[in-house]
Image: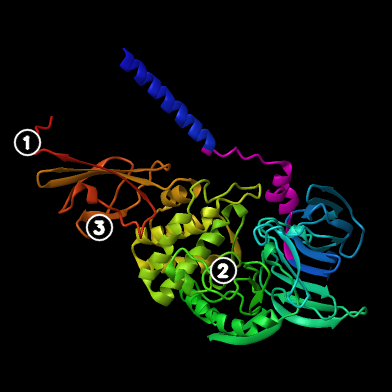
Amino acid sequence: MRIRQCTVLLLLFLLVYVVLGQSQTQRAPLVFTRADTLRGMLTPLRTCYDVTYYHLDIRVDPETHMIRGSNAIRFRAATGFDRMQIDLFKNMSVDKITLDGKGPLRFTREFNAVFVDLPAVKANTYHDVTVYYSGEPTEAKRPPWEGGFTWVKDKEGNPWVVVTCQGTGASLWWPNKDHQSDEPDSMLISITVPKGLEDISNGSLRSVTTVPDGWHRYDWFVGYPINNYCVTVNIGKYAHFSERYINGDTLTLDYYVEPENLEKAEVQFQQVKTMLACYEKYFGKYPFIRDGYKLIECPHTGMEHQSAVAYGNLYVGGYRGRSSSAVGLKFDFIIIHESAHEWWGNAVTATDVADMWIHESFGAYAEALYVEYMWGREQSLKYINGKKQNVRNIDPIIGIYNVQHEGSGDMYDKGQLVLNTLRSVINNDSLWFATLRGLFETFKYQTVTAEDVFNYINKKTGTDYTYFLNQYLRFTRIPQLEVMTAKRGDTVTARYRWIADVPDFRMPIKVTTSRNTYEFIYPTTSWQTMALGDILPEEFKIADDLFLAELRLRWIYLDPNLQMR
């Protein structure tokens, strides 16, 4: 009786322990507000118009941290309407709004949204709404991870001003339709700065003009669609050098760095040409030929601003001198990763930030392809698998739609591992690389959803991988291969199945069917049995350098004289 009571008490203790443990690890439920909906949802006040062109014309004062100017929004009316939403953070003042040069228009504000009342416009007509505004934009507390302006001084005491706003939103500093689904076909960026400073922005430089008070206006023209968070300013005193990259087309490469770092940059930035050769081989031509490619030194780590990549990696290997693998120190992480976004993120853009993994997972996988291009597949696998220690598996990689909510930071390292796993599952490199290239070529200069990517992969490969993509991207845990091996005399067998969230999960995987031999098996979520070769039960392994999966192995030895019932 006492033994039974102790057993019951022990079970109760374990139950309490498990519950308490779960309560400590469970994340609080996400709560979204109307402000999140206004920011993240495509309501009729947004879908009623399609932006075709922006002209951002502002004056930036490094001393007062103020900006002042206007943004002209040219749009096609998708429907007839008399009210529209434009986005601008509430700490910025809206001074006036006009339609086709006439106004002012009436408007109201709620959170970071501006609702503009205008005379009824007809469907399929084109108009210009111009927002005149001013204010002190949000200052970045931890750039580039938290959005805002960075106002610092260089080593000579000159102003050095940059902006980063991915995730937070471009509307923290300029009025626009702040949703990734709508990119202008082109854009003019006019930035006026104090005498003695220069501005480097996206696109190609059209002109530099001295305005009446002696300040200088820089006009940069972007000749391709551009997502809002990529629009940038880089204000300071720079040393500049340039070169050309020729691969059929001639691409202009321009580099802007702190003057004391010029010699280091001339050496470090030679990696740009090998990066371009690699990515053009695997993905396709650099997508912004007319706008050129720029690498611009910045006071933070870096950012993928289209055709104007921000660089802050201190001219060392890895990520500021650190890497999870030895081969990762052989190249400059920021040059290789941030430039990959010219293909994945800038040319191919996620419609909703919930699908930011399209930018970051493909961008991270591009790093591994660069390693493969330079040092071979074996080194690439070491690079990829070095990232496993960084995977947290706390939240899904795909975020929540319509509320401006990105998925887990696992979209970087886990995303890289997932794409490596998909390559292994497809088991046909010619088809795999044709799929990557085709995905880019099909969707460049467009915004896409997860479903677009899934459907393309399924169609191109001729196999439905929706089960795979859903498990790895929409759920938190990685699949478990549950295996029970048994040795009876000279015979070794294995029973196996997948444990996964997706009911029909059926990923092929390579395992040790005999000693030092990996072969494909085709598990489902139902038990299957197979005979193994010259291998001990505890020696069963999966090819974990090729697949991101967990092996849950149990084994047993059976006396051959035991009569099985």
Pointer 3 or 1: first along the chain: 3
* Front residue of 445 and 419: 419
Q: CA distance from mark 1 to mark 2?
A: 63 Å
Start-end of magenta stretch: 25-52
- Labelled disc at residue 73: none
Q: Position of residue 243 (x, y in %)?
A: 61, 87
Q: Is residue 342 above or below residue 7?
A: below
Query: Where is residue 174, by image quadrant?
Result: bottom right
Q: Tags 3 and 2 in contact by the CB under 8 Å rule?
A: no
Residue 251 appearing in the image: no
Look at the image and tell me in which quarter the N terminus lies: top left
Q: Is residue 246 above or below residue 106?
A: below
- Labelled disc at residue 320: 2
Q: Is residue 288 above or below residue 115?
A: below
Q: Is residue 50 magenta?
A: yes
Give the residue displayed 78% in from the left and 51% down from the top. Answer: 112
Q: Position of residue 528 (x, y in %)?
A: 25, 43
Q: Position of residue 397 (x, y in %)?
A: 52, 51
Tag 1's secondary structure?
A: loop
* Residue 248 relative to residue 523: left or right: right
Look at the image and tell me in which quarter the C terminus lies: top left
Residue type, mark 2 in image = Arg
The residue indicated by pointer 3 is 519
Pointer 1 or 2: first along the chain: 2
Report crowding for label 2: few under 14, some 14 to 19, many 20 or more residues within 10 A (C-alpha).
Answer: some
